[in-house]
Amino acid sequence: AVIVCRDGVNGDGTVTDDDTGLQWEQKTDDGSVHDFTNDFTWSPNDGPPDGTVFTSFLGTLNDGRSPTALAAPAVSPATAIVELRTIVDPHAPGCGQGVACIDQTVFGPTIPFLLLVGHQ
């Protein structure tokens, strides 16, 4: 069931899901590190977490200091999928019609999942 107004905007570029306690990044359309068109990798070779999400994304957020793989959260891909499903809103405007099925007024502009399939 969808819980209305369960996502609290924190005012710092993040959203907290009051139901799960998970914190999410708000995306932008401004060319910054938060731009929804950016594509970051977890690991370029399916090895340790040392891809651009660490060297570029988190490095930018941490004032140019590139965090190490040791800073990577212990989240498996399967867990990440389960967590992502918690923000799906089948009632979001345009859901299923080429628009991401999340509340974009809260999370910002988002590329629909179908466009990401096979885009690794």
Image (cartoon, rainbow, N blue to C red):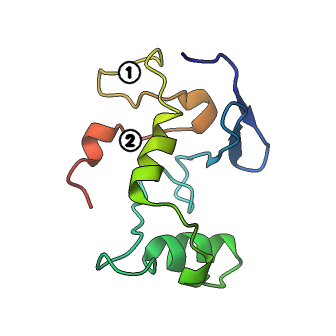
Image vertical order of residue 53 relative to residue 100, above or below: below
Q: Which residue is mark 1?
A: 95
- Which residue occupies 52% across, 57% down? 31
> Seen in the image, is 77 located left or right of residue 35?
left
Q: Farthest residue to the right: give it.
A: 11
Secondary element under disc 2, as helix, strand or loop, is loop
57 to the left or right of 62: left
Judging from the image, what secondary structure is the residue with disc 1 in?
loop
The residue located at (49%, 23%) in the rendering is 89
**Measured from the top left, where is residue 51 in percent x and y?**
42, 77
Question: Residue drawn at (69%, 25%), measured in percent from left and top?
Answer: 6
Where the N terminus falls, by quadrant? top right
Q: Identify the disc placed on residue 46.
A: none
| Residue in the image at 43% along x and 19% along y | 90
Task: Assess disc 1: are there few (<14), some (14-19) or many (≥20) residues with their C-alpha within 10 Å of its C-alpha.
Answer: some
The residue tagged 2 is 111
Number of dots carrying numbers: 2
Which quarter shows the C terminus? bottom left
The residue under label 2 is which amino acid type? Answer: Ile
